[in-house]
């Protein structure tokens, strides 16, 4: 662009020079008409006029040359703009590449935060005096003991709840889900819908109880339910 500007300035100066020469030519013609000069002097004027005309013709040719150069410079400028646009398009990332870069950046930031946290803990431990470290450890130990106590209390509550449920089942009543006819001596037979009282577990599969008519014996746990749940 700077070269194009310089060429335009040069052309403008050249046109001004041509205008000055034309003015000189007109002045000489007027001088020739007004003065009745001798033939030799007239020839000199004619020679000068011819030189000026020749300069004007050469100047016109040179001006056409400048026009061609300016046209070439403009074409080069357009080609340069196209190359710049192509380079910019090549450097524009695609959408998937942008998403990938964003995920990578997030991952690196998370890793950086984790590293900062680890370094902070390391520096904190190094900067603490022995007494301060001991206080920190004692506080951490107290916190852990408090957590252990809370867990033990929860376990105790759960155990108490389980024991209570078992005791309720042992002292409670059950509903027969199906008919059962005891095949062996000591088995308790009942019909679907019968209420079995005073049930107690014999082992993991068998229970003992009695019906409302006073019959007692053992029966499989899958045959009845307590509080709507099968045993």
Image (cartoon, grey):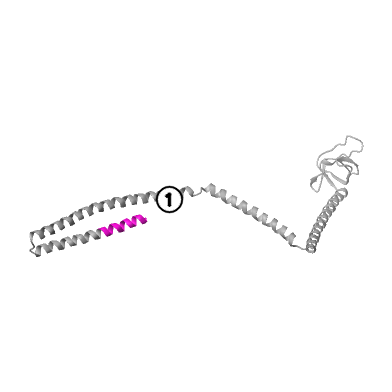
Q: Is residue 73 above or below residue 25?
A: above
Against 41, residue 168 (above or below) is above
Q: Would you say the magenta stretch is mainly helix, strand or loop?
A: helix
Q: Position of residue 119 (x, y in %)?
A: 69, 57
Q: Quadrant of residue 214?
A: top right
The picture places residue 14, in percent across and down from the top left corner, at 26, 58
Quadrant including the N terminus: bottom left
Query: What residue do we see at 23% from left, 51% from top?
Result: 61
Q: Quick check: is 5 in the magenta stretch?
A: yes
Left or right, residue 226 beside residue 105:
right
Where does the C terminus fall, quadrant-wise?
Answer: top right
What residue lies at 84% left-to-right and 50% top-to-bottom? 162
Report x, y in % for residue 73.
Answer: 34, 51
The residue lying toward the viewer, choosing from 16 and 142, is 16
Q: Residue furthest top?
A: 183
Q: Is residue 69 left or right of residue 84?
A: left
Residue at 11% across / 62% down in the picture?
Answer: 32
Magenta part of the chain: 1-14
Q: Is residue 29 magenta?
A: no
Question: Who is closer to the viewer here, 110 or 66?
Answer: 66
Mark 1 Cα-neighbour bin, 10 Å: few <14, some 14–19, many ≥20: few
SS under mark 1: helix
* Residue labelled with disc 1: 84
User: Could you say where residue 126 lies in the image, as x and y percent from the top left?
Assistant: 74, 60
């Amino acid at each position: 662009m700077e070269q194009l500007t310089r060429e335009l300035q040069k052309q403008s100066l050249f046109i001004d020079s041509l205008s000055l020469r034309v003015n000189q030519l007109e002045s000489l013609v007027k001088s020739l008409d007004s003065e009745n000069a001798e033939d030799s002097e007239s020839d000199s004027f004619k020679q000068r006029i011819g030189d000026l005309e020749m300069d004007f013709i050469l100047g016109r040719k040179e001006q056409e040359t400048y026009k061609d150069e300016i046209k070439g410079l403009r074409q080069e400028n357009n080609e340069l703009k196209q190359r710049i646009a192509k380079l910019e398009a090549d450097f524009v990332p695609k959408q998937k590449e942008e998403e990938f870069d964003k995920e990578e950046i997030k991952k690196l930031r998370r890793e950086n935060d984790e590293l900062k946290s680890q370094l902070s803990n390391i520096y904190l431990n190094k900067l603490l005096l022995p007494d301060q470290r001991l206080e920190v450890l004692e506080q951490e130990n107290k916190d852990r003991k408090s957590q252990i106590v809370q867990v033990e209390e929860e376990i105790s509550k759960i155990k108490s709840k389980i024991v209570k449920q078992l005791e309720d089942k042992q002292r409670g009543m059950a509903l027969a889900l199906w008919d059962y006819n005891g095949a062996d001596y000591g088995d308790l037979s009942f019909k679907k819908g019968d209420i079995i009282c005073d049930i107690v577990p014999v082992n993991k599969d068998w229970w003992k109880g009695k019906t409302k008519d006073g019959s007692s014996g053992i029966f499989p746990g899958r045959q009845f339910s307590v509080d709507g749940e099968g045993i």
